[in-house]
């Protein structure tokens, strides 16, 4: 499997943050489920970015 780029993770994190800020209320179950996934990603992605950065620095 190809390595995930830190830039791609940072871009995804910014997209998630924009979705959370601009998401309109209501919308039913599908939008609520997407919102929950977005909230989880909002906390998980920065940890992954830091972890990958530390691992790459340790390898060099």
Image (spheres, rainbow, N blue to C red):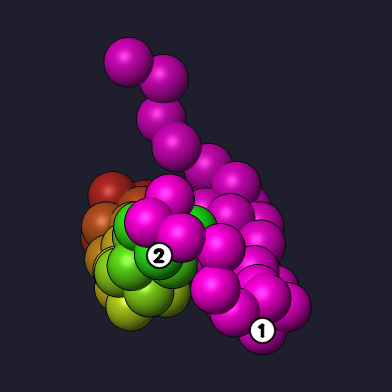
Q: Which residues are magenta?
A: 1-30
Q: Is residue 5 left or right of residue 22?
A: left
Which is in the foreground here, disc 1 or disc 2?
2
Residue 10: name its quadrant. bottom right
- Hey, which quadrant is residue 2 in on the image? top left
Residue 14 percent location from the top left of the image: 65, 69
Q: Determine whether 52 is above or below 36 in the image.
A: above
Count neighbours of disc 2 (C-alpha within 10 A) and say few if under 14, some if 14 to 19, many if 20 or more: few
Residue 9 is a magenta residue:
yes
The first of marks 1 and 2 along the sequence is 1
Queried whether the magenta region covers residue 7, the answer comes back as yes
Label 1 Cα neighbours within 10 Å, binned few <14 / some 14-19 / many ≥20: few
Residue at image mark 2: 32
Query: Is residue 5 among the parts visible in the rendering?
Result: yes
Mark drawn on residue 43: none
Horizontal side, residue 5 vs residue 49: left or right: right
Q: Is residue 2 above or below residue 29?
A: above
Residue, disc 1: 21
Taking the spot 59% from the left edge, 79% from the top edge, the residue there is 25
Predominant SS along the magenta part: helix
Q: CA distance from mark 1 to mark 2?
A: 14 Å
Between residue 45 and residue 27, name the one nearer to us: 27
């Amino acid at each position: 499997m190809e390595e995930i780029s830190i830039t791609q993770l940072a871009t995804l994190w910014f997209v998630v943050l924009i979705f959370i800020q601009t998401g309109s209320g209501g919308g039913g179950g599908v939008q609520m489920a997407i919102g929950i996934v977005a909230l989880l990603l909002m906390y998980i992605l920065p940890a992954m970015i830091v972890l990958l950065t530390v691992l790459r620095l340790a390898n060099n």
